[in-house]
Image (cartoon, rainbow, N blue to C red):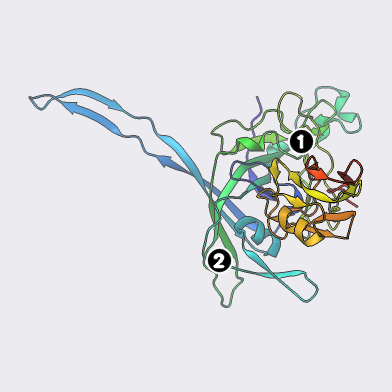
Amino acid sequence: MTSFGLVKGVRARITLVDPCGKPIAGPRSRIVTTGWISANVEPQMREAEDLEQTNAEGRVCVSDRTPPERKWNNVTLELCKVNTCLIGLMTGWELVLDWEGKPVGFSDQKEIPTDRGVALEIWSGVGMDDECEVPTDDDILAPGAASAALPYGYTLLPVVREMQVGAIEYGASVSTITLTGITANGVRWGRGPYNVVATDGANTAGRLLQPIKQGQHKRVLYTTIAPPEATEDCCGLILPTPYYGETAIDVAPAQPACGLEPSNEVQSAAITGTPTGGTYTLEFDGQETSALAYNANAAAIQAALQALPTIGAGNVLVTGTGPYTITFAGDLAGFNVVTIIADDALLTGGTDPAVTITVVTPGGVWA
């Protein structure tokens, strides 16, 4: 049995997730920081309730009690160095950009987003008396041996949502920013996108050995895998594949170096066979466009694609006069998206008219 204390916060990593803990891959989805003072995690309980019934004489004839239940954890994070991207990740607030397009601040907003959250990972020391175990053999002398690695405490909150910035005091003292939120069920975090625990006696870093289960809001454990280095800004996130289930891989891929940008997916739509009439449709991720005329121009194709709920306004650009170049942008920039499917059965005239979709540039390639 392992016993350890939690002392001195060493590092914190914040990752953008959906309301159930699924990591959201993208070019600015994670940040690692040392710029925090404290993190407080306090259970919010549903108190036990006494159940009692008296008889006609006024004496207790039935007495019982409902069990207490943890509803969520109240999370308070106090920052001493305010990275604008960190604030944006945790609150969903709009970032203020300078003339070069670099984030230099943030603006608050009236609504508190409920369709997103962050995963908060915290590494701590384990106490000086617990750092050094007594060797029982010479295995500790082998390079990279797990028994020679220094231990850390690791705390995971797979979903923290409804983050809000508290009061900021300006005066003759250092100003800090305090963020508060609540935890939620983090079952979609699974085993996570990062390597945080040892998977064998050689101290090979891998994903969590057991996934987050239904109703779990917090996990605390002892690990011999060192925390990641702090990053200067938000960085790209890629996910292991397969991510879930019995076939999920044990060791996650290395995350992209900060500062790199993933490629935007570019697809091409070529209309061949010289049709003289009829229509065709395009399907993206299960949603089909309205009918497009055989000679529809780039603007019409772009409007039809942006009208799809799986794409949305501003998330695809169409150029050219045939073949048409379809570039994914906006919320779909930097992702390896599904390939568009064309239904050309209603094209007429010409010789075997068809619409052919090809991937010119795969999205999500980091370079």
Q: Nearer the viewer, mark 2 or mark 1?
A: 2
Give the answer, above or below, for where 171 lies relative to 72.
below
The residue nearer to you, when weighing 294 against 27, is: 294
Residue 287 seen? yes
Number of numbered callouts drawn: 2
Q: Position of residue 349 (x, y in %)?
A: 86, 46
Q: Amino acid at mark 1?
A: Thr
Name the residue at 58% across, 50% down.
Answer: 115
The residue nearer to you, when weighing 286 against 130, is: 286
Q: Amino acid at mark 2?
A: Gln
Q: Element type at marker 2?
A: loop
- State how far apart marks 2 and 1 are (Cα): 41 Å
The residue nearer to you, when weighing 148 against 176, is: 176
Name the residue at 66% across, 28% down.
Answer: 2
Q: Position of residue 201 (x, y in %)?
A: 82, 25
Q: Earlier in the sequence, mark 2 or mark 1?
A: 2
Q: Position of residue 111 (x, y in %)?
A: 52, 61
Q: Quadrant of residue 157?
A: top right
Quadrant location of the N terminus in the rendered image? top right
Q: Element type at marker 1?
A: loop
Horizontally, residue 33 falls left or right of residue 166, namely: right
Residue under label 1: 224
Name the residue at 55% across, 39% down.
Answer: 185
Using a 10 Å C-alpha cutoff, classify the residue at mark 1 as few (fewer than 14 neighbours), some (14 to 19) or many (20 or more).
Answer: many
Q: Position of residue 312 (x, y in %)?
A: 68, 55
Q: Are marks 2 and 1 in contact (CB under 8 Å)?
A: no
Give the answer, above or below, for where 132 lies relative to 97.
above
Residue under label 2: 109
Horizontally, residue 54 falls left or right of residue 128, namely: left
Using a 10 Å C-alpha cutoff, classify the residue at mark 2 as few (fewer than 14 neighbours), some (14 to 19) or many (20 or more).
Answer: few
Q: Quadrant of residue 35?
A: bottom right
